[in-house]
Image (cartoon, rainbow, N blue to C red):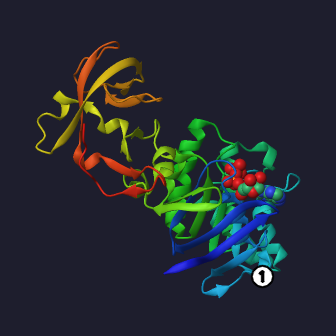
Amino acid sequence: MSVVEIRGIKKHFGDVRAVDGVDLSVHKGELLVLLGPSGCGKTTLLRMIAGLEQPTGGDILIGDEVVTNLPPRARHIAMVFQSYALYPHMTVFDNIAFPLKARGIPKEERRAKVENAAGLLAIESLLHRKPRQLSGGQRQRVALARAMVRSPRVMLLDEPLSNLDAQQRASARDELQQFQRQMGITTIFVTHDQIEAMGLGDRIVVMHDGQMRQVGTPQEVYYDSADTFVATFLGSPGINLVHRADYILGFRPEHFLPKDVLAADEEKCVSFTYDVTRIEYLGADRLLYGNLVGIPSDVKTMSRLPTTVPVTVEAGQQYEFVIREQDLRFFDHTTGKRTAPREIGE
Ligand code: ATP
């Protein structure tokens, strides 16, 4: 069942097509991530769902009701911004209670809801503090508590973790996911960080230039990318793209391995002579940069080789590297879209 239905939604600012015809169904209880580079239109799409931006065309339905022309407060959604937008002069308790007070909820009921939310997010001991006396992660939890006390139909999150350092982000991601699952609130989460998207999303919408390139589970968008944009945007390093006469061959660095490593495998492989030019040691993995002998290319072909694989590789040497046929991807030369597999000629 879909909770949010987006039909042909558009937002043009003069000549800028910020969002240019997006169709999307958000399922009940799922955590859907809108992912894409800066300027691809993800915040504008989120703001249109929230009612903070009026679409140029198309419709938005929340729970089967067309809300396209309704103001934000009539949509029963909650939004958490990057800045959290907490009121600095109010205590944590009053910040969380604020939306309930604004709706005229009686005092006792307010207290019960705030305490319940604070309990779920483990911030009971912080209720008397002011926002400036909190860490970034604690502020995020307060903003989430304030969003959830309203029992929204949908929670909209715009890069809520971007103020946290790398370590805090990992634990905040974990907390957010647990909280979202526990509450079962349908959630739309905006980020430009593909690792965050892959780790957090039940499904990911990859956007580019105001359009939706692909929607799918993290596994689908990563392993079965719909086009070269999605394939390159996901993964670090991204997919290798080798331009042949009339198609583009794609394979992920972790699938491009020395022949000896895959030799025991029954599956069919294609093989290349790989001229390794540079090696980076990353601890768990070795990142290899090099060229495919006989196939000119402007960019290096990369291999990600776990250090636990006991093979010696040195820069300046050539090796036989292989890819399982099942891990090869083919893309159209002109459109960049995924195409059917084909025979690889020399
Ligand atoms: P970021 O990750 O940088 O926030 P984004 O993917 O969220 O990017 P949007 O903020 O939705 O992108 O912007 C999409 C495009 O629309 C951009 O080219 C932006 O400059 C443009 N845009 C957004 N808001 C306005 C506005 N009020 N007036 C004119 N152009 C705008």
Instruction: Find residue 236 and report its horizontal and vertical position in percent.
Output: 47, 37
> Horizontally, is 2 left or right of 15 in the view?
left
For residue 134, say whether it is visible: yes
- Position of 283 with respect to 43 (left or right) is left
Q: Quadrant of residue 301?
A: top left
Residue occupying image coordinates x 66% and y 58%: 42
Circle 1 sits on which residue? Answer: 70
Q: Quadrant of ligand 1?
A: bottom right
At mark 1, the secondary structure is: loop
Count of number-bearing discs? 1
157 in relation to 170, above or below: below
Amino acid marked by disc 1: Leu
Residue located at (36% from left, 27% from top):
285
The spot of residue 10 in percent (x, y) is 70, 70
| 138 relative position to 255: left or right | right
Measuring from the top left, give residue 122's x and y in whole percent: 60, 55
Front residue (pair 274, 222): 274
Above or below: residue 204 compared with residue 236 = below
- Name the residue located 57 percent from the left edge and 62 percent from the top edge: 212
The residue lying furthest to the bottom in this view is: 65
Q: In the rendering, at what x and y percent does residue 5 appear?
A: 59, 78
Q: Is residue 8 above or below residue 43?
A: below
Q: Compare residues 81 and 241 and report the one nearer the observer.
A: 241
